[in-house]
Amino acid sequence: MRLLLVQLFTLVVVIAANSETEELARKISELEDEVKVLKVDLNHRAVTVLSGEEANGDPKCAKVCSGTTGRSTTDWTDYGGSTGVYKNVDISGCGFVKIPTITTSIEGSGYHWEITGTSAVYFATAISFRTYLGGNRPNTRKGF
């Protein structure tokens, strides 16, 4: 009887081990499939750097960062005695290690099409840049 119980217990342990082995094999197979997908994703990057002002770094480190200075809340600074304004824009949160290619634009509900400098970038660094806007209106700030 005791031998029969030992054999039965051994059989239960073997069945449990086989069940665990099958579960582990299934999980390993799933992980292998995920690795294949990740390898494909690396080859089909969403960001491709074609050219830039500086030598390209590691293409695996290409980065896109976007943001806004605040719709209707941007604190523009008057530029001297002109009808222009400027804004220093902090991009340090993007984590760039080189000066990025920066694209700017403005939006509005009227007359912003008359503004000049909407895509002009000055003093670009990896952490900030400045943009100037000008117009023919006496108070450019109210023209937005």
Image (cartoon, rainbow, N blue to C red):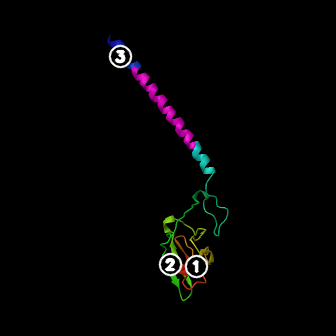
Residue type of the residue flagged with mark 1: Leu
Q: Nearer the viewer, residue 31 or 122?
A: 122
The earlier-in-sequence mark between 3 and 2 is: 3
Residue type of the residue flagged with mark 3: Val
Look at mark 1 in the image and give the residue it sits on.
Answer: 133
Is 107 on the left or on the right of 12, as rendered?
A: right
Q: Residue at x 50, y 35 (%)?
A: 27
Calculate the distance from the C-alpha at mark 1 to the C-alpha at mark 2. Answer: 9 Å
Look at mark 2 in the image and give the residue it sits on.
Answer: 76
Q: Secondary structure at mark 2?
A: loop
The earlier-in-sequence mark between 3 and 1 is: 3
Q: Nearer the viewer, mark 3 or mark 1?
A: 1
Residue type of the residue flagged with mark 2: Trp
Q: Position of residue 43 (x, y in %)?
A: 63, 50
Q: Residue furthest front?
A: 110
Q: Secondary structure at mark 3?
A: helix
Q: Magenta residues?
A: 12-35
Q: Secondary structure at mark 1?
A: strand
Q: Nearer the viewer, mark 3 or mark 2?
A: 2
How crowded pointer 2 is (Cα within 10 Å; few <14, some 14-19, many 20+) is rated as some
Rendered-image quadrant of the N terminus: top left
Is disc 1 in contact with disc 2, using a CB cutoff of under 8 Å? yes
Calculate the distance from the C-alpha at mark 3 to the C-alpha at mark 1. Answer: 87 Å
**42 relative to 55, above or below:** above
Q: Position of residue 126 (x, y in %)?
A: 54, 70
Using the image, tell me which numbered label, if any, was put on residue 143.
none
Is 123 on the left or on the right of 16, as rendered?
A: right
Is disc 3 in contact with disc 1, using a CB cutoff of under 8 Å? no
Look at mark 3 in the image and give the residue it sits on.
Answer: 6
Q: Residue furthest bottom?
A: 81
Q: Residue furthest right?
A: 50
